[in-house]
Amino acid sequence: MTAQQHLGYDAFVELAATDPAVVGLVLKGSRAHEGMVTEHSDHDLYVVLAEGATSALTRYAGYRTPELDVVVLTLDEFRAAGMPGFERYALARARILLDRLDGAILTILAAKARLDADEAFREAGGWLDAYANSLYRSLKNDRDGHALAARLDAADSMRLLLELLFALDRRPRPYNKFLAWELERFPLPGWDGRRLLDEVGRISGTGDASAQRCLFAQVEAHARRAGHGAVLDAWGEDLDVMRPQ
């Protein structure tokens, strides 16, 4: 069988499972998120090969059809995938189809799902400062009558806020598609997920200055409890612009 011949998901998994060079099969994306599958959902599959092993499956690297999207990589490449990178969340919630390494594939995925303490603290501090920057710009633009700029900055700030909140909980931020799914099943400590998303949607769409300030008051309290007071205090008197009036 050549790489040019059509190969369905079930057939590919069966083929890969019989290859002794394959040490792991991992499914990510909508198919790994219960309740998120639609008629358009393909199967995003990672094929993990033992280091130094030879496999005919390498011919399927980058194989894509409406049903199947294949990534073939070595164990070391799989360990490094998304660390850092946009794939981290996808792999954090991936589903293991095959693990020939007595749980090593599971251990690798678990490491992607949980930021270490130093990494999380560093990233949260950066996201907090970036969020405050966009918030401050939005509120100044609102004050000065620049409505479009205010809304755009508000929308930017919500993206940064979500990065911050997940970093504070030592988790990679979900893709927008999976935000509601993630918060429903794995709530952020101290936050009502549904109410948070409602506020994020409202602020992104309207740039409402009052809503931005009220949300910032909650964020400031969480950030200070997490030890990021110095990041906030560096804003000095400008904090008064961001806080409820």
Image (tube, helix red, strand yellow):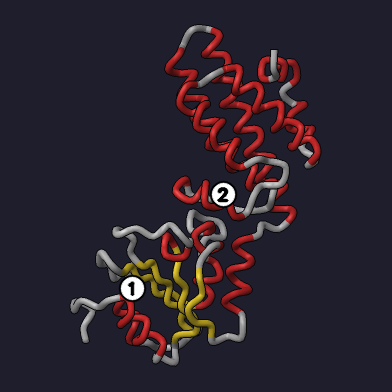
Task: Report whether 92 appears left or right of 221.
Answer: left
Of 224 and 42, nearer the camera is 42
The image shows residue 119 at horizontal and vertical percentages of: 69, 53
- Residue 241 is tagged as none
Of 236 and 144, nearer the camera is 144
- Residue 82 position (above or below residue 141): below
Going by the numbered disc 1, the residue's amino acid type is Ala
At numbered mark 2, what does the secondary structure look like: helix, strand or loop? loop
Gap between marks 2 and 1 measured at Cα: 27 Å
Task: Report whether 236 appears left or right of 24.
Answer: right
The image shows residue 128 at horizontal and vertical percentages of: 66, 35
The image shows residue 30 at horizontal and vertical percentages of: 42, 60
The image shows residue 14 at horizontal and vertical percentages of: 36, 86
Residue at x 81% of width, y 39% of height: 225
Residue at x 56% of width, y 62% of height: 92
Name the residue carrying label 1: 61
